[in-house]
Image (cartoon, rainbow, N blue to C red):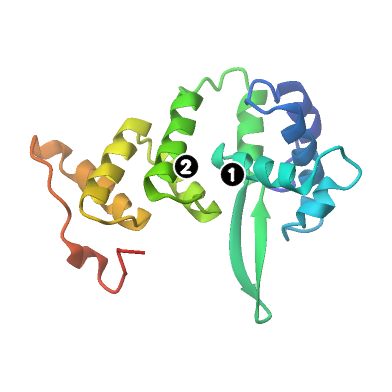
Amino acid sequence: MRYINVPVNKILIDKYGTLGIDEQSLVILIRLMDIYSTSDKLPEFGTLAAHTTMSENDISKIMKNLIQDSLIEIETVKDQGKFIERFSLDPLFKKLIKAADPGAGEKKQDPSKIRDLFEYVELLYGRVISPNEFQRMNSWLDDSGHSPEKIKEAIDLAYQNQVTSLQYVERILNSTDNRKEEQSSRRRMPVRSWLEGEDVFD
């Protein structure tokens, strides 16, 4: 989708407010789009901050919010024996395409509830959530259609059993979906044998 035939810069400038993007994030997204046209290697924060009034710390916070808001994706990959971070703007492009189509009226989650969910998890775990964890939780919201309330319940259930692995939380969400048709009001933890070979206490 990197080379979609739509004027993405113009759509972004016209619709950024609708997508909940502030002006500082807009500047960073435009810079990322320029870089993305030739490379998907994540640039240094200093590179993104160059020739702007923003500091590298500002860039760090903006990037975290862009991931949290499902506008960009970041992954760590091994390339020629070295680990590097790559980024994708496909989530942004998909949202821009929908924004450009007046008929694409999807029902969206309440942004404030989503932010509250991430803040709750960080407070509960006592640490900042990693980019991969942000992406995983956003996939539960966007791809699987789970509500923030349902995800919070699954996280609480896992935490009560001294498990802070999001992979295990995902198992709870999936097991809940599978039991919907059984009309069972009793909630139980999925057996840990489902995670064969995985350390659920990470």
Picture residue at 61% right of the left edge, 33% below the top: 95
User: Which amino acid type corresponds to the residue marked 1 in the rendered image?
Assistant: Ile
Q: Is residue 50 left or right of residue 139?
A: right
Q: Quarter of the image containing the C terminus?
A: bottom left
Q: Is residue 142 visible?
A: no
5 and 130: which one is in front?
130
Q: Which residue is mark 2?
A: 138
Picture residue at 71% right of the left edge, 48% below the top: 2
User: Which amino acid type corresponds to the residue marked 2 in the rendered image?
Assistant: Asn
Picture residue at 76% right of the left edge, 32% below the top: 24
- Label 2 close to label 1 by CB (< 8 Å): yes
* Residue 23 image position (x, y, % from top left): 76, 28
Which sits earlier in the primary sequence, circle 2 or circle 1? Answer: 1
* Residue 131 image position (x, y, % from top left): 55, 52
Q: How many marks?
A: 2
Picture residue at 49% right of the left edge, 25% below the top: 112
Q: Is residue 109 left or right of residue 172?
A: right
Instruction: Count residues near mark 2 (Cα–Cα under 10 Å), then give few for <14, some for 14-19, many for 20+.
Output: many
Instruction: Count residues near mark 1 (Cα–Cα under 10 Å), then give few for <14, some for 14-19, many for 20+.
Output: many
Residue 14 image label: none
Q: Is residue 127 above or below residue 96?
A: below
Q: Which residue is mark 1?
A: 67
Q: Is residue 43 above or below residue 182?
A: below
